[in-house]
Amino acid sequence: METKETKEIKKRKEELFKVIADANSELEKLRSECKHEKTFKGVWQWAPGHTFNALICDICGECLKNLDMPDDGWETTTNKTD
């Protein structure tokens, strides 16, 4: 049986997950509009303990290229869908 406190915690958790999802959607939109005019070389972590050297947009923070991959035409972007 759920207590009032448990129900409140679950409700707040769902509210916070919604805020995160909305923020991620807005960030994706901003990154798609960014012209990536200023970049820097840095380390990109795509999962805990999994990193690679990357070209990163200094304006929107998008990973534009995995610098550890050979330049064979393969593109690495966080927004690439096609």
Image (cartoon, grey):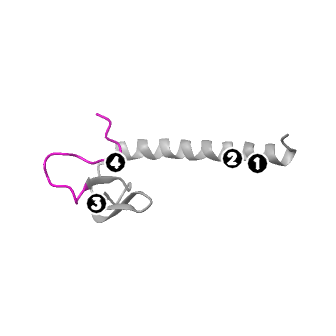
Reading the chain from its start, which is encountered first: label 3 or label 1? 1
Real-space CA distance between mark 4 and mark 1, rounded to the nearest whole angstrom:
37 Å
- Crowding near pointer 1: few (<14 within 10 Å), some, many (20+)? few
Whether tag 3 and tag 1 are in contact, CB under 8 A, the answer is no
Reading the chain from its start, which is encountered first: label 3 or label 2? 2
Residue tagged by mark 1? 9
Real-space CA distance between mark 3 and mark 2, rounded to the nearest whole angstrom:
33 Å
Residue tagged by mark 4? 34
Q: What's the amino acid at mark 3?
A: Ala
Q: What type of secondary structure mainly makes up the magenta span?
A: loop
Q: Is residue 10 left or right of residue 43?
A: right
Q: Please give the name of the residue rendered at 26% of the width and 55% of the height, measured from the top-left corner.
A: 66
Quadrant containing the C terminus in the rendered view: top left
- Crowding near pointer 4: few (<14 within 10 Å), some, many (20+)? some
Residue tagged by mark 3? 54
- Callout 1 secondary element: helix
x, y percent for residue 67: 22, 59
Q: What's the amino acid at mark 1?
A: Ile
Q: Given this view, does label 4 or label 3 mark the residue nearer the observer?
A: 3
Q: Given this view, does label 4 or label 2 mark the residue nearer the observer?
A: 2
x, y percent for residue 49: 41, 63
Q: Please give the name of the residue rendered at 49% of the width and 45% of the height, measured from the top-left corner.
A: 24
Q: What's the amino acid at mark 4?
A: Cys
Q: Please give the name of the residue rendered at 45% of the width and 60% of the height, measured from the top-left corner.
A: 48
Residue tagged by mark 2? 13
Reading the chain from its start, which is encountered first: label 4 or label 1? 1
